[in-house]
Amino acid sequence: MHLFDRHKELQALSEAFADCAGGAGQLVMISGGPGSGKTELLHEFANTVAAAGARLLIATASVTERFQPLGTAGDLLLSGDVAADVLDRITGCRTSAGSTPPPSGQEREKCVARAVQDVAAAVVELADERPVVIGIDDCHYMDGASLQAVLALLQRIRTRRVLVVCTGWEQYGPAHPLVHTELLRRPHRRVRLAPLSEEGVGSMLAAQSERPLPPGARSRYHRMTAGNPMLVRALLDDTTRFGADVAEPVASVAYRQAVLACLSRTGPGHARTAAALAALGDAASARGAAAVTGLSPDEVQQAAELLSSMGLLDGYRFRHAVAAGAVLSSLAAGERSRLHGDVAQLRYEVGDPLADVARHLLAAGRAPEPWGPAVLRRAAEQALAADDVEEAASFLGLALRECKDRRERHALSATLARAVWRVNPAAAGPHLAPLYPAARAGSLDTRDTATVLRHMLWQGDTDLAAETISALGGLRTRTDARLLAEMEFVRQWFYGAPRAGQRGDTGRTSPLEPTVVDHTSSLWASVALMAGGSGGTVTDESVTHVAEALQSHQLSDLRLELTTISLMVIAHADRPATAAEVCDSLLADAGRRESTTWQAVLGAVRAEIALLQGDVETASEKAVEALGLLHPQGWGVLAGLPLSTALFAYTARGRHEAAADLLQRKVPDSMFQTLFGVQYLRARGHHYLATGRAFAALNDFETCGQLMQDRNAGLQAMIPWRTDLAQANLRIGKQRIAKDWAQKQLKQHGGFGSRTRAVTLRVLAGASQLRHRTALLRESVDLLQVCGDRLELALAYAELSAAHYELGEFPRARLLAQQAAQEAAVCRIDSPVGNRLERPEPEAPGAAPALSDAECRVAALAALGYTNREISSRIHVTISTVEQHLTRVYRKLNVASRTELPSKVIEYRIPTPSDPAPAARSAAVRGTA
């Protein structure tokens, strides 16, 4: 084995051998900590002198033979050509100690004394022929008789060609104090093995690397090992085994084994100190280790110095976590548990951070009362605040296992459920279902009660949640009332359940009482007023306020549903771009915090927002992605949210097989008692319509109507099941019934936003006479330009184009068909007008007349069929100004009336302006959000 950084030590040994060969006996003591390379140096030197003709007698003292007389001496002589009678006497002394009956003490002492002298004489006799080199590795473990033999030999070799080389620790410890004392009293040379320098470590690395080492490589190894050759070599073994770059050390199996090998050569006190320091971790100190080991601080200090010289410690801390882990793993399970329990007790008493104390309790697998469970619970709350769900759940699981108090167990169960809910709502169920009776009885605190209510609602137990809220109506504090009022708000507006105690009530009453709203945070008060306030009016100011609040609040487990309501209110209130921006921000935060449930639900909301914008490709992709984040059981009734969005989107894209596959997914029956079930039925019905099953669609839409009868009036306006029924009746030829359903939808009060009304107007136009159709469709187009649904806008343009085509207004029909195709292209779907209105583009259109921007806008709007009054309203000018613009347009385009404008707009490719109001409004909101 090649040695590195040991040239001076080998030179000192060579000089001693030269003196020995000259007839002057020598004793050399090689000292150094475990793993410092003493054995390698001894064997390298032995190989050298053997090549020079010396006779070698080599033995390694062992802690297991420390009490066996002449154990080491016998091994020495067995390695050389010694007279058989001497070996027999030594063997006799070694075996007689264990004979039956054992010899008397005096007889044994005489036997050993004779053997000691025989050993010395035999070695001296060997030196007559050629130099003799005796090597004793780990001499501090020599038995007493072997030590006496070596001392007897040293008395005889002053003028003999004998060299004795002993290796041992710098600090011999309690193994055999006489070894240190007696040998050092004899004339000797000292060779101290210091740890490898950085240069020496670099030489070892260079020998293993095929290319030059980068800067800093040798220092990384040196920091991890302090230059201990055994540890450096182990790191190299691990690194090459894993195929890693030699410059980047990997600590694994070989390193762990090397650490334990170093420790195995120490005494019990050193091993106990090492284990205590490993368990204490960053809190390691001499006083702390002394407290858990029972050793004195001075004894700990001495042990730590030795462990530092071995390259394991830097002060009182292990140089690498793998080394500390190896030491702890080597302990028996019971001993390791006791050690961590003692460390936990110590750290709790000195006031160390709760998380550190809890980790030791977790490692110990026990939490002594009364302080243990309380520490674990508080540490779990801190871990949750830091988004470490796994650690929080571990703390709470141990606390729950150890806790005997019923009330405390309830609190721990609820806290544990909140923790695991973040990543898997299904895992929260077993912890919360047993708490239902306690919640109804009011024996849980408010936060835990809200957690149980959330689980009830998530599973679709809306009636049970309502009964529980009613049973808890006599709360004493307004804080309690506020949280429960929020849960009732969620029950009605998120899950769509009837108001507690008022089934069938469709009044427009806000579920939050005024006294509660006063004490609710401004965010949730605004949302409540937006969703449940009078008139259903949502202002830019209220949207801006909610958007700002959403982006400034931290994610909260108890308010995910309220956040979802906020985003959906903003999106349905003709601000989908603002909702998308805020949702993306929250999704990014959920990703950073690794909250899978937040990511899944917000991802489903983001898909719904994309659907409201007509971006059906994004909607389907994000909905399916959200579905995959949670196990089907984890979704509960909320599975209907991403499923309905994906079904709507796939149907719009013509991907009917993908939609059919989603319909095979099992959903809970309780989902159909919530809005998510209603939306699922609506989406399935539209899939049926698109695939030629109009009567199946009609059945689903009628079921939606039955399910919606007891819902809040605001939800009646937001869920256009009547419009769906109108579409299904149109498809089966029942035009009059279709018209009635569409008109009933338009009469619904409450609701907000333009989209539902716009879609209903388009459907109503299909059920109306031709002479009424264009006005209805133009109003639908105007509303859709405001709400931002590009897909519905494409459909409305297509039907308006068809209406003008039936009226014989072919240029205007073609112009509108182009608009429909453009919007469809934005949505990445096929054009809804097909090719029946297409005509070849002119090969070389004439030079476009010099129209101003205002004249272009007026000409395009007039070509689309808008009146002068409607144009003035859209571009915010007077009717007189519109008339003046039209006069100049007629002259420049050489037309006599409005009916000629569509063909000229197409011919000269005059752009048809979209309404700038939505973009401006969204920009304004973003600028203040």
Image (cartoon, rainbow, N blue to C red):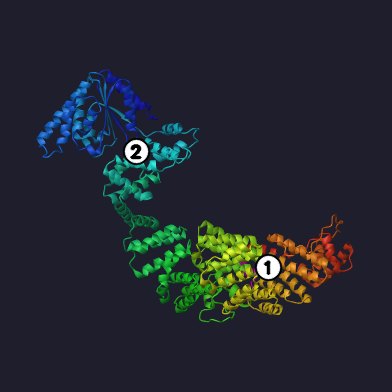
Picture coordinates of residue 282, whole percent (x, y): 38, 49
Is 106 left or right of 538, judged from the image as shown? left
Residue 419 badge: none
Instruction: Check disc 2 and report the residue beneath it.
Output: 309
Magenta segment boundaries in residue numbering: 537-544
Quarter assignment of residue 839: bottom right
Question: Can residue 625 be seen from the camera position used here?
Answer: yes
Query: Is 351 part of what is drawn in magenta?
Result: no
Hey, what amino acid is under mark 2? Ser
Give amino acid for label 1: Cys
Whether residue 465 sits left or right of residue 189 in the image: it is: right
Count how many numbered circles sit on residues in the image. 2
Residue marked by disc 1: 787
Structural crowding at the residue carrying mark 2, measured as other residues with C-alpha within 10 Å and reported as few (<14), some (14–19) or many (≥20): many
Specify the quadrant that holds the N terminus.
top left
- Residue 866 seen anywhere in this rendered image of the structure: no
Mark 2 or mark 1, whichever is nearer to me: 1
Where's residue 798, x and y in %? 74, 67
Q: Most prominent secondary structure in the magenta stretch?
A: helix
Q: Quadrant of residue 609?
A: bottom right
Quadrant in which residue 269 is drawn: top left
Local SS, label 1: helix
Task: Check the image and report above or below for 730 versus 612.
Answer: below
User: Element type at marker 2?
Assistant: helix
